[in-house]
Image (cartoon, rainbow, N blue to C red):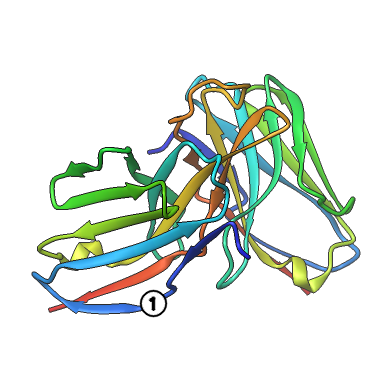
Amino acid sequence: RKEVEQDPGPFNVPEGATVAFNCTYSNSASQSFFWYRQDCRKEPKLLMSVYSSGNEDGRFTAQLNRASQYISLLIRDSKLSDSATYLCVVNSRAGGYNKLIFGAGTRLAVHP
Amino acid sequence: ETGVTQTPRHLVMGMTNKKSLKCEQHLGHNAMYWYKQSAKKPLELMFVYNFKEQTENNSVPSRFSPECPNSSHLFLHLHTLQPEDSALYLCASSQNAGRGLALQETQYFGPGTRLLVL
């Protein structure tokens, strides 16, 4: 089983739509969770951290369900500029050091 | 923009060539990373350096040789690569990759080197 699993998509949605991405992780000891965004042929950039109580940043809402080992990202009122690949990222500890495990990403295409 | 630069941005090399990738971070971080990103696959962590010491070698073949002369610079020396090594190689940095610290720590990525091995 992959450590971090995501639906690869693509999700094709019209401007203004609400879209949700899901992610599951296998390591129950993971403590930190993130969503990164990667534009085509660019590097990943942090979109937002995910906190246990859920958190919101403008049109973006992230949720965490530790019992189900499940993370979600909701984007409201989609913009053309939201088109990108969204990477689910989970912290893992190995040998006492923290490292990030990346999902393969979910591709979003927002069309006019 | 992110404070992490990588050179070259594109590289084409033959299987017998030797080349080096360079990464520099201007963020005052103590940890630096090499990742490999192949098409349709997740980022694969290759190496981690924390305060210039290698703390992770993720079963990377010896044809990839990292070097970290100081906390701001990271190199990846390439030798006798295979065509399947063609990928985007990303460097990243963070404040600290240390034990138990900064669980919410962000990694900042460079723009990557797109490598093609012929």
Quadrant the C terminus of chain A occupies? bottom left
Q: x%, y% of residue B57?
A: 78, 41
Chain under disc 1: A
- Residue lying farthest to the front in this orientation: A67
Q: Tell me what residue is drawn at x 86 percent, y 54 percent.
A: B61
Task: Decide if residue A29 is on the left or right side of residue A111.
Answer: right
Q: Secondary structure at mark 1?
A: loop
Q: x%, y% of residue B7?
A: 61, 46
Mark 1, residues whose alpha carbon is within 10 Å: few (<14), some, or many (≥20)? Answer: few
Task: Decide if residue B87 is on the left or right side of residue B95.
Answer: right
Q: Which residue in the structure is indicated by mark 1?
A: A9
| Relative height, residue B55 to residue A19 (above, below) | above
| Relative height, residue A60 to residue A55 (above, below) | below
Quadrant the N terminus of chain A occupies? bottom right
Task: Decide if residue B65 is on the left or right side of residue B91.
Answer: right
Q: Tell me what residue is drawn at x 57 percent, y 22 percent.
A: B100
Q: Tell me what residue is drawn at x 45 percent, y 37 percent.
A: A32
Which amino acid lies under the numbered mark 1 shown in the image of this protein?
Gly
Q: How many marks?
A: 1
| Relative height, residue B47 to residue A44 (above, below) | above
Q: Quadrant of residue B9?
A: bottom right
Q: x%, y% of residue B14?
A: 83, 68
